[in-house]
Image (cartoon, rainbow, N blue to C red):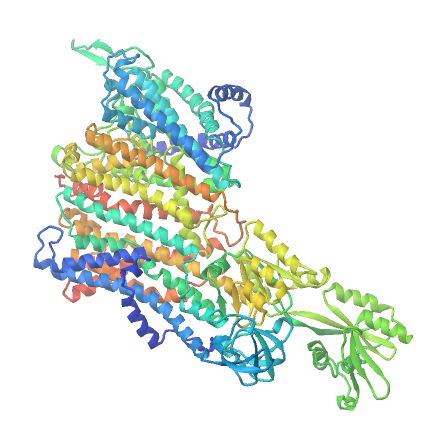
Amino acid sequence: MTWLGIIQILLVLGIVLLVAIPLGGYLYRVFSGQRSWLERVYAPCEKVLYKLSGINPTVEMDWKAYIKPLLLVNFIMMLFVYLILRLQGHLPLNPDHIPSMPWDLAFNTAASFITNTNWQNYAGESTLSYLSQTMAITYLQFTSAATGLVAVIAFLRGLVGKRAKMFGNFWVDFVKVHTRLLLPAAFILALVFVGLGLPQTFSGAQTVHTLQGASQTISRGPIASLEAIKQLGTNGGGFMNANSAHPFENPNVITNILEIIAMAVIPTALIFTFGRFLKKRRQAVILYVFLVAMMLLGTLLVYWSETSGNPILHKVLGISNVSMEGKEVRFGLPLDSLFVGATTAFTTGAVNLMHDSLTPLGGFVPMLFMMLNMVFGGKGVGLLNIIMYLIITVFIAGLMVGRTPEIFGKKIEAREIKLATLTLLIHPFLILFASAIALVTKTGVASIANPGLHGFSEILYAFSSAAANNGSAFGGLSGNTPFYNIMLGVVMLLGRYISIVAMFAIAGSLIRKPVVPESAGTLRTDTFAFGGVFAAIALIVGALTFFPALALGPIAEHLQMWSGVLSK
Amino acid sequence: MSNKKQSVTKDIFKIAVVDAFKKLDPRVMIRNPVMFVVEIGFVVTLLLSFMPNLFGGNYGAKQIPFNVVISFILLITVLLGNFAEAIAEGRGKAQAESLRRTKTDLMAQRRSKDDSYESVPASTLRKGDIIRVLAGEMIPADGEVKEGLGSVDESAITGESAPVIRGAGGDFSSVTGGTKLLSDQLVIEVAVNPGESFLDKMIGLVEGASRQKTPNEIALTVLLAGLTLIFLIVVLTLSPFANYVKGSIDTVSLIALLVCLIPTTIGALLSAIGIAGMDRIIRFNVVAKSGKAVEAAGDVNTLILDKTGTITIGNRLASQFIPVGSHSLSELVNVAVLSSLFDETPEGRSVIDLAHKEYEFGLQLEDYNDAENVEFSADTRMSGLNLQDGTVVRKGAVDAIKQFIKNKGGRIPEDLDAKKERIAKEGGTPLAVTKDQEVFGLIYLKDIIKSGMRQRFEELRKMGIKTVMCTGDNPLTASTIALEAGVDDFIEEAKPEDKMRLIKKEQSQGKLVAMSGDGTNDAPALAQADVGLVMNTGTTAAKEAGNMVDLDSDPTKLIEVVSIGKQLLITRGSITTFSIANDVAKYFAILPAMFATMIPQLQILNIMGLTSPRSAILSAIIFNALIIPALIPLAMKGVKYRPIGATSLLMRNLMIYGLGGILVPFVGIKLIDIIITALGIANI
């Protein structure tokens, strides 16, 4: 661990902040209906889109009217992608003659990409045709990110709205997210990526002859375009099996930094959008400070743990210092650590090193971030989780100042607490129960590559990744079995939609309540004191739940490693 | 009741112990999900005490003592929770008992159709019956006085021994059953049917029979149930996890972990806190018709207070003599005293008091014993006396005196109007004093603000509560008093409709409004307000409309009621925080103990250095049980509310109950472990 390394990390996070603040303002202006100079460019295009799809942009929706098309559109998209994957062998754009997917893998993949998880039980270059990579994968990488974004935007409108029908119009939002954010941003980023050496082609894999005279097949394809939205949309599903560790997805330090910024910037910006909707800049600043502090602490723990290396390797093989197993030399440890932290905090799921090879504590941090699921979190849904924790915090802390707790002026009563508790509950339920089922069944255990504690961590990581809609894999677990394809698929779907619907119901209930004006007796949520309570409650309620499991997995593994015992 | 502020007596204690066992009934327990889980845990561990291998495994006889002890501690935990609730109810029951004693089988004299009175049991009285009560008799039912005037001893209800006057008409016409008429005779129209009387309602309230969970309590119960469910998942999945890493955890240890993690502390004390909160209100001599009203009191944003009797003492008092024309101050003082000689009103008395205290006057009062008293009347708006020698002395409203002088052909001093204006501008009331045809000067009558009011309004401001003063005074006077008292706002020349309008306006902005009142014309506003505190001296209509009745009839109590409401919520929040924070230490006690044989390296988590895995589990669960009775006094008394601003209050309570909640169990569990080890049962 060096100061230079820490400065690298801080520098990248600083750039993220610099981009996120204006982007947060831009998102607010777009979705609060303020006109901007770009209106002249966008409005006519959108008008055509509305006309073509029969959308009446003036219709205002209440929470139920908003969530219904959201769920319906998601269902239809998932079905569409499932069919493409099942039929890709018979469809065009398949130069490498890749066969159609079996039903369980197709279900898992469709569930994975519709939920913005991007868990991949397949190797992209050898399992997907170019049609699938673009029409199924890249397509959903846009729309699933858009779904999360419009969900949180509508939720924020509900939070500050005064009439039931103030959630906006789902169709309009869904179009605008694409036209005004994701498409232009991804287009520009893809061009930059091409400039930095990422391939973008529809030609099939190339066979080359090596210096030794052997022949080698080099996969390629429309990578740059997928890579851009993969990061921007906090998707994480790579073109290649090696994901961002592959030189075609992430060739150098510059692309590595760009990828970190791309996955971090929209979730960070949403915090500031949140502040703008509330008309409370300070609220956003306080949240950002505590979230970035959690994120930074985790990242530094990874950095420290990886620098400390593995004492057993030192004793047996004389390898000391930094643990470089499973890492790409071209990125450097500080940015590797930040990538690990960011990809799980922002629930992207892209990896630029093998998480399975991280030291136990290095693997502990990404697991913890996914279990918390609120250290910024993924596109949109992350902020929903943050607000869920805010509601729980306000409820407990609010009582301590002697008033019926209020969040942003609206009273929190039994209905809101019921729904927030459901959202809080579903996450540990999915992770722990699914892991337990996997561990007590023969087929579940059969997929584990490593025995003992590390094998346990592999399972725990997989279901945390699925429930948090992260998508990064610890590796080591052979997930492409009917058992895991179905289990993980179901966990991903439940992990995403239950909390979105529950949080929407909260907004639907809050919007009907009068705003209690702020007074000296009101608990302010934009103070450092409150931020501290928020972080403490998230850690105690969110993380302590997983403490026994983590103690059995990475913590025990860490302790064993440092006492020189090999995990059995 | 204030003279019977008993805390926990032996009787209450005994009844509570019995009730704690009665409440073990699962049908009762299920209402408290957290403690219900503990009870189920008790049943399971009890079974395992007899059949240690019920859920598989091969534990043998060595496991039995441990299972028995855990089972016993779980039972104690449930009982302690029940006891906390029972003891909170017990205090109410004791109060109800003493109230019931006043409600013995009274006889009533009911007027028959032929206007004669017949003796009937009080329990047969119906609404609309006319009854007669003679001096020395108990009033048999709630009602309105139709005829007569008498003094009533209401100490049975209010604990106030000084008798109060009750009479027909006006705002003092309502009487309560169970009180005693001391003098004269009253004819009363019964206002309620049997079982609906104020006394009945009060008994029901203090007994907790009609207690319903308040909205906030329901929300908290939901959260606690949710947390319980989360920890249930944690514990249920732990066994398969452990099995995978080639270990096993016995069911009893898992149940112990579960009970330690679920928020039993707040779960056990939650209803006790609610009952004790209501009880505190009652002991404050305020009867709240529902717990919801008490909770709402804590949320109040706007407080509407009447000026007279609430902010100022009821009457205006003389504060200065201002001579006019060519008259000297001592001349004026003499005439003023003379005019008030027979004046028994507080204003009149205050004139003589002021003269005595601050001025010399050379009158021999005995000389005027034979003077003729002229009482104040609404027509003349003057009072005074006529001396034997024909001298006419008067004091009264300036306009009335001016007219009086003009009629007599006297002269009005030029500076009279200016001085009168000055007094009015300062918020005072000028009284002119005259002898024969000359105006001698003015008496400056002033509203006297009750001591400590300014400071209380300051406190309210810090609580974030706006105070609005209602007064019938003109704008000038009103603003002066508002400024002096330190209220945030005022409505002058207020009519009952104005109050109503204000309440509706505030409520439309999402604010909660509290007010106090007593008159029938206050009733609509009292009903509209979120918290309506009605004076016990008030009319039946007012009492029906409000949601709290103050037995002492002290409107300033509204401020205390707000504090008690806040205290209730703070206590709930603080103990919840404490309960959740406790989990940190319990994890560090139990987890290393559970995993000790599986993964010895995890012993490093045993940062408390507990003797053995079993002593660790025992210490944690004993601590978990003992913390309940340790916090009963806090639950009963409530966490003190300090008006220091929300964020400071949050920090303060967080330091005590949050940080304390993390640290205390580390110390407590370690201490219990030391004792267990000393007793030699660490490896039971």
- B667 lies left or right of B204: left
Question: With respect to residue B627, does B90 lie above or below?
Answer: below
The image quadrant where one finds the C terminus of chain B is bottom left
Q: Position of residue B534 (x, y in %)?
A: 56, 66
Question: With respect to residue A218, does B606 lie above or below?
Answer: below
- The answer to which of B385 and B545 lies nearer the viewer is B545
Q: Quadrant of residue B375?
A: bottom right
- The answer to which of B604 and A312 lies nearer the viewer is B604
Q: Position of residue B453 (x, y in %)?
A: 59, 66
The answer to whether one can see residue B499 in this image is yes
Q: Position of residue A313 (x, y in %)?
A: 15, 34
Write the residue at 58% across / 65% down.
Answer: B542
- The answer to which of A58 and A322 lies nearer the viewer is A58
- A154 lies left or right of B684: right
Q: Position of residue A236 (x, y in %)?
A: 32, 27
Write the residue at 47% across / 42% down.
Answer: A283
Write the residue at 27% across / 67% down.
Answer: B21
Furthest-front residue in this view? B114
